[in-house]
Image (cartoon, rainbow, N blue to C red):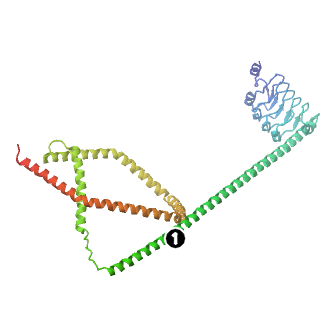
Amino acid sequence: MQNNKKKSVSVKDKLDGNEIDLSLLELTEAPVKELAAVTRGTVLDLSNNKLVTLSIAFPTLTHLIKLDLSKNQLKELPVNFGDLKHLRHLDLYSNELQRLPVSFHQLKELKWLDLKNNPLVSTLAEAAGDCLDQKGCQEAAKKVVKLMTVVHAELEKKRLKELEEIKSQQMAQKQEEDRAKERERQEKKAEKDKRKTEAVTKHQAAVSQAAAKKSAVNHAKSEGAKNEKKNERQQPKKMKPKVAGPSFCAKFFMLLLRLFILVGVAMAVVFALNWEGPLTLDNAGKVAVRSMDKTTAYGLEVYDWASPHLLTIREQWKQLSRFVAKNGRDIVNIAWERSVHYTRIAQQEFWVSWPIVMQRTGEVMSLTGDTAVHYWRIVCREAPIYYKELVDKVTQLFHGTQTHAGNPS
């Protein structure tokens, strides 16, 4: 029923000059959208209706100069009611208002105000007065706007004070967190210094122990040398046989032999994978040609597959070169700063880890050297046997092939 009434109201039909009379229509809601379309109507009469509240969009009617809301059931005004900054005449007689919104202080052009017959709070009622005549209503407008200005200032002051308190609490909390972080950092530093001191002490103890051990060994060696010399003086001298080591030519020949064996093994593997038919020189040539063809074809396939990737890598390299040319100075500066930073860290940690690294490196090098010498002796001992067997097999192979070629069946 209310919607039908609302639709039946035509704001344009109620317009008379600059006045819009919507009184005595039992409206429960102000037609804000229709009123906003008629900006010529600066005087609006909504008295003697059933308005309980005004929508939040009502203060957008900033063209209003005079507004009559008397004899309704308004319990509150919108919080943004102060946006009606051009309002000069406001009649709120006989409603149910107790307070006015703080934004009321923005109505600097308000010259006339009637708040009679409203259950206002004492402070607001005292400022509003009785409004029995023109002068009384003008004084009411002035005093109420002034009162709301004071209220706004107090609220703003209170808000700023609360913000300051919140900010102070945040600063105190931040300072406490900083102090906690500093304590944690100092504790970590103290623990790190303690570990470093312990490591240096252990290193010094290990060095002292090693020096003492070395001194004892040297003493034992010197004592043994003295005893040997003493025994040699007492016993007749014996001639020690000289053991001649391998010459340079022998070493060079052994190196060539190993390379020859490696190449022969590789060729034998390729031939074995591609061999078909009898064991003849012609068939070996065919196998070699077929192996070369397969190798060439595989190389072409690899080239076709790798060409797009090589082009992509070339483009990426060009982009990287342009980026380095553009940002080279920044990259060098950052790299230098990082290098200095990590160099300092490495310098601090060097004297702690160096003795351990040296000890482990010595152990690894000693073990690697012993293993290499052991296997090298085995290779040097066994290589001539394999070489002789290989020469015999090759000689038999080609001798049999020549015999077969000279006596065809």
For residue 174, side relative to residue 70 (left or right): left
The structure residue drawn at horizontal position 36% and vertical position 77%, both measured from the top left corner, is 228
- Considering depth in this image, is 274 or 230 the residue closer to the camera? 230
Give residue 191's quadrant in the image: bottom right
The structure residue drawn at horizontal position 33% and vertical position 62%, both measured from the top left corner, is 373
- Considering depth in this image, is 54 or 191 the residue closer to the camera? 191
- Residue 146 screen position, x and y as percent: 87, 43
- Considering depth in this image, is 213 or 174 the residue closer to the camera? 213
- Residue 161 screen position, x and y as percent: 80, 49
The correct choice, above or below, for 306 with respect to 229 in the image is above
Tell me, yes or no, if residue 169 can be seen here: yes
Tell me, yes or no, if residue 293 can be seen here: no
Mark 1 residue crowding within 10 angstroms, few (<14) / some (14–19) / many (20+)? few
Among all residues in the image, which is located at the extreme bottom?
233
For residue 289, side relative to residue 128 (left or right): left
The structure residue drawn at horizontal position 16% and vertical position 45%, both measured from the top left corner, is 286
Residue, disc 1? 208
Q: Where the C terminus falls, by quadrant?
A: top left
The correct choice, above or below, for 38 with respect to 301 in the image is above
Q: Tag 1's secondary structure?
A: helix
Count every numbered label the image shows and give the total: 1
- Residue 320 screen position, x and y as percent: 44, 53
The correct choice, above or below, for 325 with respect to 70 in the image is below
Q: Where the N terminus falls, by quadrant?
A: top right
For residue 30, side relative to residue 270 (left or right): right
Give residue 242's quadrant in the image: bottom left
- Amino acid type, mark 1: Ser
The structure residue drawn at horizontal position 16% and vertical position 53%, both measured from the top left corner, is 394
For residue 275, side relative to residue 72 (left or right): left
- Considering depth in this image, is 105 or 66 the residue closer to the camera? 105
Give residue 248's quadrant in the image: bottom left
- Residue 32 screen position, x and y as percent: 75, 29
